[in-house]
Image (tube, helix red, strand yellow):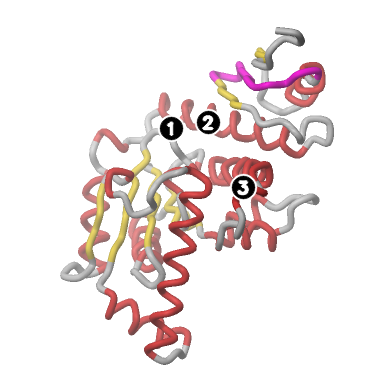
Amino acid sequence: MAIITISRGTFSGGKMLAECLSQKLGYRCIDRDVLAEKAATARVSQHDIRAALEAPPAFPGRFNHKRYLYLALVQAALTDEVRSGKAVYHGLAGHLLLKGAPALLRLRIVAPLESRIKMARERLQLGRHEAMEHIAKMDQDRRRWTQFLYGVDWGDPALYDLVINLERISIEQACSLVISMIGQPEFEFTPAREAQMNDLALACRVRAELALDPFTSNLEVDVEANSGAVLIRGSLFDQVEEVERAARAISGVTRLTVEDLAPAVGA
């Protein structure tokens, strides 16, 4: 009952692999659209979420808090979707959005450029030059998005447990390889790991709710959870009571500790 994330370039075969795994394992298959629908709120539309997942702002320095808001919403949505395991997510930065999740298998799929061009031409009805431009733009946007949110190189193999090159391996073979990996003890979704996942989901939900609450939406905090006990840290200044009020109202929070890291006035 592992959780699988698949990172891939445009038309690299990641979606096909996700669908193969979903069919053979009986796992839920989650993509960007499902995530956008789940993350959307009255304040942030599905369109806003999709746009944020497709490309980073042109001027990142001006959108730091918007970045925090979108990240909080998307992380909360994804952790809630996969909290019970048996899920495969093929979308941008799933392995980073789920950082700290137990029983997580992080895949990176690559494919030869010519096969990607062929697939783009067939599916989008593009000429060769247009297909190449489309692939280059989408890959660049994904690289910039990951750099914008996490400060890491999207293509760094050190971010993944397994990198699969589809040049000489079929989707069926890749699927069988992944299935053999999740049979290992490291990816078994034990009760203890399920409890860890529930803690991660609760922490992400608290962070998202604080980002949406009108009285705490200006703050950026770190949140940890352990069996319902929640710890919130951040520079809160005179908003500690508002943070406590908002956090205590969230289902699943049984105990609350709030640490204000803001320097004392006059210090």
Expressed as whole percent of the image width and height from the top left, the position of residue 196 reads: 47, 27
* Residue 137 visible somewhere in the drawing: yes
Residue 114: quarter of image: bottom left
Residue under the point 33% across and 44% down: 159
Crowding at mark 2 (Cα within 10 Å: few <14, some 14-19, many 20+): many
| Stretch in magenta | 226-238
Expressed as whole percent of the image width and height from the top left, the position of residue 122 reads: 40, 87
Write down the residue under mark 1. Answer: 100
Direction from residue 134 to residue 43 in the image, left or right: right
Which amino acid is tagged 2? Leu
CB contact under 8 Å: marks 2 and 1: yes
Mark nearer the viewer, 1 or 3: 3
Crowding at mark 3 (Cα within 10 Å: few <14, some 14-19, many 20+): few
Residue 95: quarter of image: top left
Which amino acid is tagged 1? Gly
Which amino acid is tagged 3? Gly
Residue 170 versus residue 185 in the image, above or below: below
Q: Residue furthest left?
A: 168
Residue under the point 83% across and 36% down: 214
- Marks 3 and 2 sit apart, C-alpha to C-alpha, by 28 Å
Q: Nearer the viewer, residue 181 or 205?
A: 205
Write down the residue under mark 3. Answer: 61
- Marks 2 and 1 sit apart, C-alpha to C-alpha, by 8 Å
Residue 213 versus residue 177 in the image, above or below: above
Q: Which mark is residue 200?
A: 2
* Residue 256 visible somewhere in the drawing: no
